[in-house]
Amino acid sequence: MVGSEQDESAHDRRASGLIPLVLVVVALIGSVAVPARQTWLITGLLRKTTQVLGPARLHQAELQSGLAQEIGALQRYALFGDTADLTRYRVMARRDDALVAELETLAAELSATSSAHVATIRQRIDTWRRASGSPIARNASRAAVAAAVETAQLHYDDCLVAIAELSADFGNEASARADRVRSLERFSLMSNIALVLAAFGALASVIVLSARERRLAALLRTRVDEESARARREVALRESAEALAGVFTADDVTQRIARAALDVVDARGAFIEWVTRDAGVAEQLSVRAVAGTGVPPLASSCEFAGSHAERAMRGGNPELIANFGLDESGARSTFTAGPTAAIVVPLGSAGAMVGALFILSAHDSFRSEDVARAAILGHLAALAYEKVRLFDQEIRGRQRLERVSSSRSRLMRGFSHDVKNPIGAADGYAELLGGGVYGELNAAQHESIARLRRCIHDALGLIDDLHELARAETGHLALSAEMVDVADLLRDVGEEYQAKARSRRLTLTVDVCDDSPLIRTSRTRVRQILANLLSNAIKYTEQGSVSVSAAHRPVGPSGTDGDWVCIEVADTGRGIPSDKLEFIFEEFGRVGDSDQAGAGLGLAISRLIAQALGGQITVSSEPGSGSTFMLWLPLMSGAGDAAGSPRRLRTREAVPLA
């Protein structure tokens, strides 16, 4: 019994000694394992933030800037027609597609919401490009490109909205990671306290691991703060781009650029030195806009030669100055409150620099990404200044056009009053003379008076043509729409000019069919155009024939879709050189030395009337092979089948008019 009790007592002692040992071992293991796990989690968050979230945010900002450059290239092409802008547009489109692909890869590692937003961005970019780039794909006119870009603006805005939503996702992801870090820190602190109370012997290990954990947490918080600050700067950059898109004067652009620099680069002050160029005076710099603190007063000035602004404008790229304000470099500036770190950004485009933006550091230093953001801001400023220049140029051009139109209108009114009335009075006296009111006339005198009256009527016709041209150019043509039978109209005009064609020994044929369509247009104006075309064809054809025909065409001039009626007036005359095909439609445009009467206004008036009717006049010709003038008019069925489809013109043998 005694031995048995001793064995049990020894077992109990071993057991009681084992419990503290187990606790110490558990505490030691826990003091290492728990902090190690927390460290591993925080390190993973830090790595994912650095390798995924940071690059994703940078790509998102680059994508937004790239889209702005894409639409800028399209707008410049629509304004100037420079194919280099199309090349720049395609290069930026390929780069932006690569950025979207990288965003898809990175977003897949973050959340399903981010992946969905990236997919939405790709879809909206594709939709915008199809809407704005389709005229380019089919080589349409610059006006069509401009119209497509304007129509696709809503799609472009949808792209910006999707990018903003993605940026918000990234911000939420950063906030969630910060919350996760704080949660891990609290759990780690509580576990460490418990483990220290359980086993003081594991304190050293716990302290070492905890210190490392705190350093990592501080580093992560720093990274999160940096990402948050970067996000704020990205928002400021986007808002600056939107604000610059809505200004239309150089002064407004200058003021907004100075204010935007404070948020985009996180600076304490910014100012703009503007180059003043006066004839006979050396170029000067003057402070045009200021923002923040520590900046020179407005209107401060210095010489442009040898200044920091001149160096930056000559190089064309932003420059980082470590000790701005010191005289060691010898460069001039209106800033004298240094030294401080500063970024100098040239403003304007190549060959048209207007000044420089100076950004003063709030922390006595700048990072490389600050210089990159300043460069983006400078590029946005260049685009804004270019837009203002084009806008001013357009306004001046419109004003010149209005002055020319007003001058022509005054000329026409004066012409009518000062010339037409006296000529009409002269015609009246000539008529009295020819009628024998002032005495009998012999045959030679009658012929002379007849020639005099023909000359007077030609002069009056020229005045009427000038009036008609002025009305057409200013959009004041009298148009009265009605249903017009093409066949009936062509036969009518053909009959009218049949005698004139026979007098020149020409054959005039009209090729139409009885069931030709009706078109809703101005019969008087179409007849006027056909009369001009037929008169010219007969006038400039020495031998052979003149033919008039009509046909339905599913494709209109310049490849435009829709239903059209094409009325052709063809002749076997001398033809027109290819380099003169557009010249003949200009005012007083006549080809070669012609002995035929006429001022050269008929085709100019006819084209303007055709455009007012929604149509067009085109011509095809070769020297020695005759010419074919084509009048295109949009087709509207006046009588057709039950479905209302237009009746097509049937071709048949051309027959001379009786």
Image: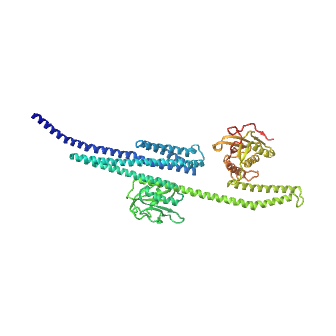
> Which residue is painted at 79% across and 55% down in the image?
457
Query: Is residue 174 visible from the viewing direction of this image?
Result: yes
Horizontally, residue 446 falls left or right of residue 166, namely right
Q: Which picture quadrant has residue 323?
A: bottom left
Vertical position of residue 267 compared to residue 116: above or below: below
Residue at point 41% right, 48% down? 172
Residue 496: horizontal and vertical position, in percent? Answer: 79, 46
Q: Residue furthest front?
A: 1
User: Is residue 496 or residue 122 the one in the foreground?
Assistant: 122
Between 631 and 218, which is closer to the camera in this rendering? 218
Which one is nearer the viewer's eye here, 635 or 377? 635
Q: Nearer the viewer, residue 259 or 459?
A: 259
Dividing the picture into quadrants, the one containing residue 140 is top right
Q: Which corner quadrant holds the N terminus?
A: top left
The residue sitting at 53% across, 44% down in the picture is: 127
**Whole-percent x, y for residue 369 in the image:** 41, 52
Q: Position of residue 279 (x, y in %)?
A: 54, 65
Q: Where residue 320 sits: x, y (%)?
A: 41, 56
Q: Does residue 624 appear in this view?
A: no
